[in-house]
């Protein structure tokens, strides 16, 4: 039996449920004996009782893509989709990702040092900034502020949230999926908001996607190369998605992050890119399941 893990108790649980339902439908249509499991804190007991032959990891965010689930499944010797423990834990921690990939020539936004005074975040830099958790996805908790006076009090974030500050990069939002080590294409994401936030990502009509992106060939090739480099160097498996910002006025591409558990919903970028490359959703899910393994 194939078990699709979804849900959980993090901020991205609902996105995960949508991914899980879509993957369950695709797997069953391809003949897999698949069941959906809502993840709770009794997951080890559920896995012992159900004895799945493999797991499709449709979890997002902390616990699901930070190495925790991967470590558990490794210990239980249950093959699973997507990246393993090390790649997942590094990719989930944005500063760790920068440290691991920066020497490859991939350009990231600079880190801005900051201090906290009276529950206020004071960056050591003027101008517009982005404040975000070190290890959340789906743009959860990301704030764009025109300056220190516009940054919310630290109580805006949960107590245990580790934060980071970067300069706001103007420009165009680009993304590349890498499937089984091969970059698919570049998508440009456009929306009315200042950046590609949670609602834009997962709401129907929240954003529009152009693929392939109508951008200069050198920018296109840069995004494809960096996504491939990141996937390979971190040791990612299955599928990943790397997000970029192209400051066309400055002529610079910046890598924002690599996602080892990208969304698999009806509006998600990875299934869309795969379909563009001739890989329908059902085949995509099957290929990921067939490649399931432990570290």
Image (cartoon, rainbow, N blue to C red):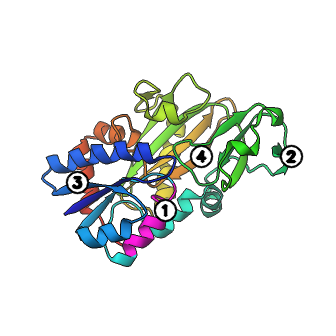
Look at mark 1 in the image and give the residue it sits on.
88
Return the x and y of residue 184 as percentages of the image width and height. 37, 45
Mark 1, secondary structure of its residue: helix
Q: What is the distance, in whole Å, between disc 3 and disc 4 at their CAs?
A: 29 Å
Q: What is the distance, in whole Å, between disc 1 and disc 4 at their CAs?
A: 16 Å
Look at mark 3 in the image and give the residue it sits on.
286
Q: Residue at x 59, y 54 (%)?
A: 135
Q: Counting other residues with Cα less than 10 Å from the Cα at mark 3, is it few (<14), some (14-19), or many (20 or more)?
A: some
Q: What is the distance, in whole Å, between disc 3 and disc 1 at their CAs?
A: 21 Å
Magenta stretch bounds: 62-74
Q: Earlier in the sequence, mark 1 or mark 4?
A: 1
Mark 2, secondary structure of its residue: loop
User: How many numbered marks are there?
Assistant: 4
Q: Counting other residues with Cα less than 10 Å from the Cα at mark 1, is it few (<14), some (14-19), or many (20 or more)?
A: many
- Along the horizontal axis of the image, is 214 left or right of 55? right
Label ID, residue 118? 2
238 and 265: which is toward the camera: 265
- Along the horizontal axis of the image, is 221 left or right of 115? left
User: Between tags 2 and 3, which lies in front?
Assistant: 2
Look at mark 4 in the image and give the residue it sits on.
256
């Amino acid at each position: 039996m194939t078990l699709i893990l979804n849900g959980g108790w993090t901020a991205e649980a609902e996105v995960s449920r949508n991914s899980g339902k879509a993957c369950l439908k695709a797997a069953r249509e391809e003949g897999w004996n698949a069941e959906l499991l809502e993840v709770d804190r009794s997951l080890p007991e559920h896995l012992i009782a159900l004895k799945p032959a493999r797991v499709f990891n449709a979890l997002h965010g902390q616990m699901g893509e930070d190495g925790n689930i991967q470590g558990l499944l490794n210990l239980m010797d249950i093959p699973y989709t997507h990246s393993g423990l090390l790649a997942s834990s590094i990719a989930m921690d944005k500063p760790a990702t920068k440290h691991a990939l920066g020497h490859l020539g991939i350009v990231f936004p600079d880190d801005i040092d900051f201090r906290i005074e009276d529950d206020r975040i004071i960056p050591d830099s003027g101008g517009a900034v982005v404040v975000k958790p070190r290890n959340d996805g789906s743009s959860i908790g990301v704030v764009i502020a025109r300056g220190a006076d516009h940054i919310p009090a630290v109580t805006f974030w949960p107590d245990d949230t580790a934060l980071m500050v970067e300069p706001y990069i103007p420009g165009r939002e680009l993304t590349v999926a890498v499937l089984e080590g091969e970059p698919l294409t570049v998508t440009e994401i456009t929306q009315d908001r200042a950046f590609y936030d949670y609602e834009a990502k997962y709401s129907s009509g929240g954003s529009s996607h152009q693929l392939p992106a109508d951008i200069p060939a050198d920018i296109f090739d840069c995004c494809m190369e960096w996504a491939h480099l990141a996937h390979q160097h971190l040791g990612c498996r299955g599928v990943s998605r790397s997000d970029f910002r192209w400051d066309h006025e400055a002529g610079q591409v910046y890598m924002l992050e690599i996602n080892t558990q990208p969304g698999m919903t009806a509006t998600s970028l990875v299934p869309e890119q795969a379909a563009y490359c001739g890989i329908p959703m059902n085949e995509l899910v099957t290929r990921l399941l067939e490649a399931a393994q432990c570290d």
